[in-house]
C-alpha cells in the first residue's frame, strides 16, 4: 500500500489538452474514483499513473519517489502496480489459474507458495472450482472475477481499474460493485477507479474526483458531492437537479418571479450585488396541500402542479411557482398524490440549496 | 410445381460434379485400374512406390516442405509483428514487398535467382570472385537449401497475411496487462502475444508446406538441373512418353491425402476454443515503441524485400534488355531484340499471350458466376442440403493443382469427352481449381449484405430477381470484381495445372516460359517474364483501384 501523489499532471496530444493540471493525493489504502463523461481525461490520467502514457507536464510520485515526469517515466512493469482493464484482457491462451499465476511467476515465487496464493485468491473471488477452465468458457462476470484475482494476487502497491464493469449487464454490474468494495475492505490496496457511472463511484469509493475537460471539478466524499455540489457541471452530472438563477442584492435572493431572505437560506449577502446559480435536487423540496404549522421559518411558495410521472420509487412532479415562469421537478413519496392543476405549497430545504456559481 | 431455386440447385450440382467430383473420382478409379481394361489391380501402386527413386522424391518433397515453411516463418513473423504491433517506419514499404512477392510468379523468381546465384556466372558469385580473387562459388542455387530458400521467398506472404491478421485482433490491453504485472516488452511479446497467434502461425506453416509440396515450377526449373527429384517433378516424368497416367494417379494419392489431413487439422486448430480471442470494448490498439530496435526490424524487412522482390526483378530486367546477360550493364550490351523477337517473330509467344488472357478471363467469369450462385443459395438458405453445394465448391481447396490436372486429364482428355488439346479443358480445370477463391469472396460479400436489405425491397413490392439486380448486386459488386481479378491473376500465371493439359496450340504464357527455361535462353526468358509481369501489374493496379489496396491480401 502506498501513498500516491499527482502534481499538476498534464497531457496534451498535439493541440488538444486531454489532462489539464490535475492535482490529487491518495492516502495509503484509500479508494478514489475518477468520475466523468467520456473524453474528460480520466482514462488518460489512469494510464499515466500506470506508466503507459508519459505526462507532458507535472509529476506522479509514489511514497515520495517520482515515477513519472516529462523528464522520464518508470515503465509499467517496474511500478509494482496492477490494473483491471475494460476488456478484462484475460489471456485466452491460458487457463484461469495460469492467468492468475502470471504476475506471481514474474516475481519468482517458490512453486508451493505460488500454488497456495493462486488457490487462496481464487477462493476469495469464488472461482476456485473453475481454475482449469479457459477464459472462452467463462461468462462475463466470471472473467471479471479472474481479472480481479489476477490483479490483487500480486499485492500491488496501487490497484488501477479502468471502467471494469462497463461490459457487464445491469444486475451483474451491481453485484460486482459490492464485490469490488468488499475486496477493498479486505485488502485495503490504494485504489484508483475510473468510471462514468456515478452509482458505481458512489458504491465503491472513499472519495470521488469529478473530472470535466481534463480538470478535477470537485473532489469530495460521495454524499457531499450529491448534496453540496460546488460547480454547475458537478450539479448537473451527478444525479438530477434544478438549476435556478438568482440575483443576490441587499440581503435578498431574487429568483425569477419570487425572492427569499438570504439569511433564511443560509447565504451571506454582504458585498456588491451579484448573479448566482443554485442547484436544488428534486429531493430538496416538499409539496404540501396546506402550509405546515411549524414551517414559518422555511422558504415556501404557492405553486401549481403542471405535470407528473409515477416512477414506482417516487412521484416526479413538475411544479410551477405562482407568478413565475420557472418549472421545477420535485420528488414525492409514492403515496403523496397530487393531480395536475392542483394548487400546492412548495417548501425548500435550505441545507440542500447548493450555490454552484 | 418445381421452384426455380430447386432447378438452379440441380443445375449447380451437375456442374460441380462435373468440375470437382468427376476428375477426383476418375483419378481414384484409374489408380486401381489396369489401364483401359476396367479390371481392378494394385499394380499401379506397386509401380509407383516400387522404386527407391520414387520414394526418395516423396521424402524430398516432405523435407523441402518443412525447410521452406521454417524459412518462411523466419521471414514473415518478424515482419508481421513489426507492421501490426510496433512503430517501425516504412510500413508501406513492407506492404509493397509482400504484394510484390505475392504477385511475381514463383517460377519467375526462381529464374531471377538462377541469374543471381548460379554457381558459375550468377551475379552474386561474379561479385564474389571479384572481391575474393578466387573462382569458387559463394552460393549455389542448384542445391537443396537454394531450392528451399527460393520457395520460401515467394511463399512467406501467406504466413505474413495469416499472422498479421491475427495480431490485428489482439488488443493492446492483453500486452498492457502483462506489462503492469511486471513483464517488459520482450517478455510480454514472448509469453502473451506470440502464444496468442501461435495457431495462425501454425496455420500459415501448413499452407506454405502444402504449397511447397504441390509446387511444380520452381522444383522443375531449379531441382531438375540439380538432380533433386520431388513428387511434382516425378509426376511430370510419368507424363513423358509413354504416358503412364495410371501410375501418376496412384503416385498422386499421398499428396492428396496429406493435403486433406493437414487442412483438416488446421481447421480444428484455428477453431480451438481456448484460443478464441476476446473482443469487446477496450479493444483499442497502440503501437509498441521500439526505440532504436525499430531500425533493426526495418532492416530485416528491407533485406527480405531485396531478396524476394528487388534483386530477382532487377536481374531479370537487366537480362531482358541484354544481348548476353552475363556481360552486365553496359551500353553495347543493351538491346530490344529479346522483346521484338518474342512479339514479332516467335511462333508461339503472341498466341500464348492471347490464350492466357482469354482462358483466364473465361475461367474467372465461370468461377465467379458459379460461386456467386452457390453462395447466394447457401447463404440465403433457399434450398435444403445447400451444404452439399458449398462442400463441392470448397473441395478444390484441398486438391493440389497438379493432382487436379491429372484428374482432369484422366477424366476428360480421352474420348468420350475428348477434350485433350482444347481450350475447354484448360478453362474448366482453371475454373475448378480456383473455384474456392471465388466462393470465399462471394460468401464474404453476401454475408455483408444483411437479408433485411433484400426483405425491405421485397416488402415494397420488388420480386426476387429485381431485388438481386437492384439491391444485392450493386452491394456486392466491388467484392466480386476483386474476386474475379484474383482468379484471373492466379489463373494467368498457373503452371502446375496447365502443363499437364496444354496441347500444341493451347500453350499459355506460363507453359511457354517453362519451355523457354528448358531451352536455356535466359534473355528471351526474362523478356517474356517481363511481359507476363507487366500484364499482371496492370491487372493488380486495376484491382487496387476498383476493389481496394489490399484486395489480394485479405485473408480468405
Image (cartoon, rainbow, N blue to C red):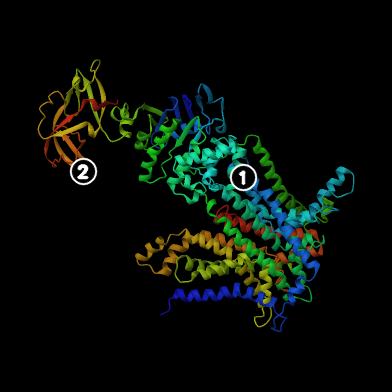
Marked residue chain, label 2: A
Q: Position of residue A73 (x, y in %)?
A: 56, 28
Vertical arrangement, residue B26 with respect to residue B101, above or below: below
Q: Is residue A222 left or right of residue A106?
A: left
Of residue A351 and residue B342, the one placed in the foreground of this image is A351
**Residue depicted at x 87% and y 45%:** B130
Q: Which residue is mark 1?
A: B81
> Label 1 vs label 2: CA separation?
58 Å
Of residue A60 and residue A102, the one placed in the foreground of this image is A102
- Badge 2 crowding class, 10 Å Cα cut-off, few under 14, some 14 to 19, many 20 or more, is few
Could you say which disc has been placed on residue A309 in the image? 2
- Badge 1 crowding class, 10 Å Cα cut-off, few under 14, some 14 to 19, many 20 or more, is many
Marked residue chain, label 1: B
Quarter of the picture containing the C terminus of chain A is top left
Q: Quarter-wise, where is residue A313 in the image?
A: top left
Q: Secondary structure at mark 2?
A: strand
Q: Position of residue B3 (x, y in %)?
A: 43, 76
Q: Quarter-wise, where is residue B175 in the image?
A: top right
Q: Is the residue at mark 1 from the same chain as the one at mark 2? A: no
Amino acid at each position: 500500500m502506498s501513498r500516491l501523489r499527482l502534481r499538476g499532471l498534464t497531457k496534451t496530444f498535439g493541440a488538444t489538452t486531454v489532462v489539464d493540471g490535475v492535482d490529487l493525493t491518495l492516502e495509503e489504502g484509500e479508494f478514489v474514483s475518477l468520475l466523468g463523461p467520456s473524453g474528460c481525461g480520466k482514462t488518460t490520467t489512469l494510464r499515466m499513473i500506470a506508466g503507459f502514457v508519459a505526462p507532458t507536464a507535472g509529476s506522479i510520485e509514489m511514497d515520495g519517489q517520482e515515477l513519472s515526469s516529462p523528464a522520464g517515466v518508470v515503465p509499467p512493469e517496474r511500478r509494482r502496480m496492477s490494473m483491471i482493464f475494460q476488456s478484462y484482457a484475460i489471456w485466452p491462451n491460458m487457463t484461469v489459474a495460469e492467468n492468475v499465476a502470471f504476475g506471481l511467476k514474474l516475481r519468482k515465487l517458490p512453486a508451493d507458495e505460488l500454488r497456495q496464493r493462486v488457490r487462496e485468491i481464487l477462493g476469495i473471488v469464488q472461482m476456485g472450482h473453475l481454475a482449469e477452465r479457459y477464459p472462452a468458457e467463462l461468462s462475463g462476470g466470471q472473467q471479471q472475477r479472474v481479472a480481479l484475482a489476477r490483479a490483487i494476487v500480486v499485492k500491488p502497491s496501487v490497484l488501477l481499474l479502468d471502467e471494469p464493469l462497463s461490459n457487464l449487464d445491469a444486475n451483474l454490474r451491481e453485484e460486482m460493485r459490492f464485490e469490488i468494495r468488499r475486496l477493498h475492505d479486505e485488502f485495503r490496496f490504494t485504489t484508483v477507479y475510473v468510471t462514468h457511472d456515478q452509482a458505481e463511484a458512489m458504491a465503491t469509493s472513499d472519495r470521488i474526483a469529478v473530472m470535466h475537460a481534463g480538470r478535477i471539478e470537485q473532489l469530495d466524499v460521495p454524499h457531499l458531492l450529491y448534496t453540496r455540489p460546488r460547480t454547475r457541471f458537478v450539479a448537473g452530472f451527478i444525479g438530477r437537479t434544478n438549476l435556478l438563477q438568482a440575483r443576490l442584492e441587499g440581503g435578498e435572493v431574487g429568483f425569477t418571479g419570487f425572492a427569499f431572505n438570504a439569511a433564511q437560506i443560509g447565504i451571506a449577502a454582504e458585498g456588491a450585488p451579484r448573479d448566482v446559480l443554485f442547484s436544488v435536487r428534486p429531493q430538496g423540496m416538499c409539496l404540501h396541500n396546506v402550509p405546515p404549522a411549524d414551517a414559518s421559518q422555511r422558504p415556501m411558495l404557492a405553486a401549481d402542479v403542471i405535470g407528473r410521472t409515477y416512477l414506482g420509487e417516487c412521484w416526479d412532479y413538475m411544479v410551477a411557482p405562482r407568478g413565475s415562469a420557472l418549472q421545477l421537478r420535485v420528488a414525492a413519496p409514492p403515496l403523496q398524490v397530487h393531480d395536475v392543476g392542483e394548487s400546492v405549497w412548495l417548501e425548500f430545504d435550505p441545507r440542500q440549496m447548493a450555490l454552484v456559481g | 410445381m418445381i421452384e426455380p431455386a430447386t432447378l438452379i440447385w440441380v443445375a449447380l450440382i451437375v456442374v460441380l460434379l462435373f468440375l470437382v467430383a468427376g476428375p477426383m473420382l476418375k483419378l481414384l478409379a484409374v489408380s486401381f485400374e489396369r489401364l483401359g481394361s476396367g479390371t481392378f489391380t494394385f499394380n499401379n501402386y506397386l509401380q509407383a512406390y516400387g522404386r527407391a527413386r520414387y520414394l526418395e522424391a516423396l521424402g524430398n518433397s516432405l523435407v523441402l516442405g518443412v525447410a521452406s515453411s521454417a524459412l518462411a516463418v523466419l521471414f514473415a513473423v518478424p515482419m508481421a509483428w513489426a507492421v501490426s504491433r510496433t512503430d517501425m517506419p516504412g510500413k508501406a514499404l513492407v506492404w509493397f514487398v509482400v504484394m510484390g512477392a505475392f504477385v511475381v510468379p514463383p517460377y519467375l523468381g526462381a529464374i531471377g535467382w538462377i541469374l543471381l546465384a548460379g554457381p558459375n556466372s550468377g551475379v552474386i558469385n561474379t561479385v564474389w570472385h571479384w572481391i575474393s580473387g578466387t573462382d569458387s562459388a559463394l552460393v549455389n542455387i542448384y542445391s537443396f537449401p537454394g531450392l528451399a530458400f527460393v520457395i520460401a521467398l515467394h511463399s512467406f506472404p501467406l504466413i505474413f497475411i495469416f499472422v498479421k491478421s491475427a495480431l490485428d485482433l489482439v488488443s493492446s490491453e492483453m500486452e498492457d496487462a502483462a506489462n503492469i504485472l511486471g513483464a517488459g516488452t520482450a517478455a510480454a511479446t514472448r509469453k502473451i502475444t506470440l502464444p496468442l497467434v501461435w495457431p495462425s502461425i501454425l496455420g500459415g506453416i501448413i499452407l506454405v508446406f502444402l504449397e511447397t509440396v504441390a509446387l511444380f515450377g520452381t522444383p522443375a526449373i531449379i531441382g531438375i538441373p540439380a538432380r533433386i527429384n520431388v513428387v511434382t517433378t516425378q509426376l511430370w516424368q510419368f507424363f513423358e512418353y509413354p504416358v503412364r497416367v495410371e501410375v501418376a494417379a496412384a503416385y498422386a494419392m499421398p499428396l492428396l491425402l496429406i493435403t486433406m489431413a493437414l487442412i483438416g487439422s488446421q481447421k480444428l486448430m484455428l477453431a480451438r476454443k481456448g484460443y478464441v480471442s476476446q473482443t469487446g470494448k477496450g479493444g483499442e490498439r497502440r503501437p509498441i515503441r521500439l526505440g532504436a530496435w525499430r531500425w533493426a526490424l526495418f532492416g530485416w524487412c528491407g533485406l527480405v524485400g531485396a531478396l524476394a522482390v528487388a534483386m530477382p526483378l532487377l536481374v531479370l530486367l537487366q537480362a531482358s534488355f541484354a544481348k548476353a546477360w552475363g556481360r552486365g550493364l553496359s551500353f553495347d550490351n543493351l538491346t530490344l531484340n529479346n522483346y521484338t523477337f518474342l512479339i514479332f517473330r516467335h511462333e508461339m509467344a503472341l498466341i500464348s499471350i492471347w490464350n492466357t488472357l482469354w482462358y483466364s478471363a473465361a475461367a474467372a467469369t465461370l468461377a465467379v458466376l458459379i460461386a456467386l450462385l452457390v453462395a447466394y443459395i447457401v447463404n440465403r438458405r433457399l434450398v435444403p442440403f445447400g451444404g452439399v453445394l458449398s462442400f463441392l465448391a470448397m473441395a478444390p481447396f484441398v486438391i493440389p493443382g497438379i493432382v487436379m490436372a491429372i484428374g482432369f486429364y484422366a477424366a476428360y482428355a480421352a474420348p468420350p469427352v475428348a477434350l485433350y488439346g482444347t481450350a475447354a479443358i484448360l478453362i474448366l480445370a482453371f475454373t475448378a481449381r480456383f473455384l474456392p477463391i471465388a466462393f470465399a469472396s462471394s460468401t464474404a460479400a453476401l454475408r455483408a449484405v444483411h437479408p433485411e436489405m433484400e426483405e425491405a425491397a421485397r416488402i415494397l413490392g420488388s420480386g426476387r430477381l429485381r431485388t438481386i439486380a437492384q439491391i444485392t448486386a450493386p452491394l456486392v459488386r466491388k467484392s466480386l470484381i476483386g474476386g474475379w481479378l484474383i482468379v484471373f491473376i492466379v489463373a494467368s500465371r498457373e503452371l502446375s495445372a496447365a502443363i499437364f493439359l496444354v496441347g500444341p496450340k493451347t500453350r499459355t504464357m506460363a507453359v511457354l516460359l517453362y519451355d523457354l527455361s528448358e531451352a536455356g535462353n535466359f534473355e528471351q526468358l526474362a523478356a517474356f517474364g517481363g511481359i507476363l509481369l507487366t500484364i499482371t501489374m496492370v491487372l493488380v493496379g486495376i484491382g487496387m483501384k476498383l476493389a481496394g489496396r489490399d484486395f489480394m491480401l485479405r485473408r480468405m
